[in-house]
Image (cartoon, rainbow, N blue to C red):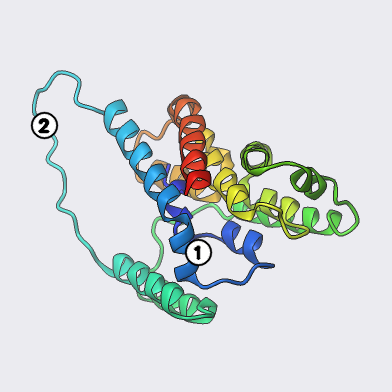
Amino acid sequence: MANAASLLLPGSNLTNLLVLRTEPQSGAAFAVRMLPAWVAACATTAAFLAHAFRPGDGRPDEVESPPLRLGLGALATVAAGVFVLALPNAALPVLATGLVAVALRRLRPRLDARPLMLLFTLAVGLGTIVRVWNGPADVLASGGTWTAAGVGAVASLLLNNLPAAVLLSSRPAAHPHALLLGLDIGPNLAVTGSLSAVLWLQTSRALGADASVRTYSRLGLVLAPVTLALTLAVFTAY
């Protein structure tokens, strides 16, 4: 349930880039605009998960947690963040950083590429459809910020947030930042809502962790609506 963290930088995920492609702005300007909502989303998510997974009986955990190690991944993330904030067009430097990081440390365990291909095919298909059908964009244009966020959240659950972003950004959105709140936070309701959740599920199960789709959705049923309403209220008040 880390989708809330992607609200701070335009390059945090492809969804942000798709929605904002018609509104060029620096990473710093975007971060300043979204900072209050990002803080609210991250704080709400952290507090909720800390409560949901609190120790039940106060006994010490018998399994010793491994030490936190900040390695190549953390370094590449920090470098990409600096590029997004400092450069007017950070796409190529960020791409180069990612390629170098992957080359130095191959992704393990191997992930199933079928969900990626399915999402890509769906996104391309919707991109073709919206060239002649502007119905979803018209709905967004006729509503306000709350409508944009709600439509983005529902569409992400039905389609996954990447194809939903393609569908809803066929024309410049009337409230792009509110739409991003829905597209980035709405997927917390179901694993299928975002690519990051799908990859998390695959990786967790490949490593032998007890990753439960039911638990994810049970928690998301409470967390997603509360977080979206709170962040949108903070955003509109800012």
Q: Position of residue 215 (x, y in %)?
A: 43, 27
Q: How many marks?
A: 2
Q: Which residue is mark 2?
A: 62
Badge 1 crowding class, 10 Å Cα cut-off, few under 14, some 14 to 19, many 20 or more, is some
Query: Closer to the camera: disc 2 or disc 1?
Result: 1
Q: Position of residue 82 (x, y in %)?
A: 37, 74
Amino acid identity at mark 2: Glu
Between residue 68 and residue 16, name the one nearer to us: 16
Amino acid identity at mark 1: Phe
Q: Secondary structure at mark 2?
A: loop
Q: Secondary structure at mark 1?
A: helix
Please report contact status of discs 2 and 1: CB closer than 8 Å, yes or no.
Answer: no
**3D distance between C-alphas at marks 2 and 1:** 44 Å
**Residue sticking out furthest to the left:** 60
Q: Residue placed at 35% from the left, 45% from the top?
A: 207
Above or below: residue 110 compared with residue 161: below
User: Is residue 54 at all visible to an observer of this figure?
Assistant: yes
Q: Is residue 20 left or right of residue 71?
A: right
Between residue 58 and residue 85, name the one nearer to us: 85
Q: Which mark is residue 70?
A: none
Q: Which residue is mark 1?
A: 30
Asked which quadrant contains residue 107, the reply is bottom left
Mark sitting earlier along the chain (2/1): 1
